[in-house]
Amino acid sequence: MAAATAMAMLAALAILAPTARGLDRAEFPPGFLFGAATSSYQIEGAYLEDGKGLSNWDVFTHTQSREINDGRNGDVADDHYHRYMEDVEIMHDLGVNSYRFSISWARVLPRGRLGGVNSAAIAFYDHLIAALLQKG
C-alpha cells in the first residue's frame, strides 16, 4: 500500500534527520541523486492479476508459510500494481530524483521461456516508467 511505503520513507527520514539537521539541498554537489529502490515482490502485489505467473517467492510463501515468522506473503504487498501513480507522487513530493525498481519476470513471462510475453505486464511497466519520467 502506498501509505505503508510513505510511512517507511518518513520513518527513515526521521531516523536520519538528527544527523542531517541543518543540511540544505544546495549543500549537495550538483547532480547529487536522492534515491529510492523497491523490489517487485515486496511492493507490487496483484498476486495473480492480469496473467501473472507464480514466482519462486509466491510458491514458497504459499507452501512454506510456517517458515515465515508472521506467515505473510506478497499477494497484496503495498498494492503498487494498482497504486503506482500515488507512489510516484509520494516520491516526487519527497524530492526523490533517482529510482531503482525491479521487474517481476513472473509477470512479464508468466510461463517462463515456454510462453509468450504478457502484454498487460508490459503495459504496467510502460505506464510506471511514463509516470516516473513525467515527474522527472
Image: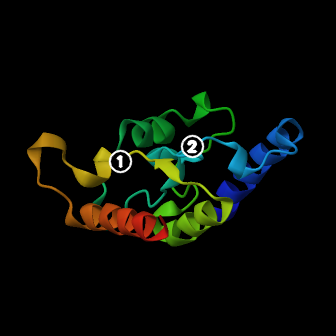
- Position of residue 125 measured from the top left corner of the image (x, y, whole percent): 33, 61
Q: Which quadrant of the figure contains the N terminus?
A: bottom right
Coloring scheme used: rainbow
Furthest residue in direction top, as rendered = 67
- As rendered, which of 90 and 77 lies closer to the eye? 90
Do tag 1 and tag 2 residues touch (Cβ < 8 Å)? Answer: no
Q: Which residue is mark 1?
A: 103
- Position of residue 51 measured from the top left corner of the image (x, y, whole percent): 27, 62
Labels 1 and 2: the sequence-earlier one? 2
Residue type beneath disc 1: Ile
Element marked by disc 2: loop
How many residues crowd mark 2 within 10 Å: few (<14), some (14–19), many (20+)?
few
Q: Is residue 39 left or right of residue 123?
A: right
Q: What residue is drawn where x is 70% and y is 50%?
A: 26
Q: What residue is drawn where x is 35% and y is 48%?
A: 104
Q: Is residue 53 visible to us here?
A: no
How many residues crowd mark 1 within 10 Å: few (<14), some (14–19), many (20+)?
some
Distance from label 1 to label 2 (Cα)?
A: 25 Å
- Position of residue 5 measured from the top left corner of the image (x, y, whole percent): 65, 55
Element marked by disc 1: loop
Q: Which residue is mark 2?
A: 32
Position of residue 92 relative to residue 117, above or below, is below
Q: Name the mark on residue 13.
A: none
- As rendered, which of 19 and 125 lies closer to the eye? 19
Give the quadrant of residue 22: top right
Q: Is residue 36 visible to us here?
A: yes
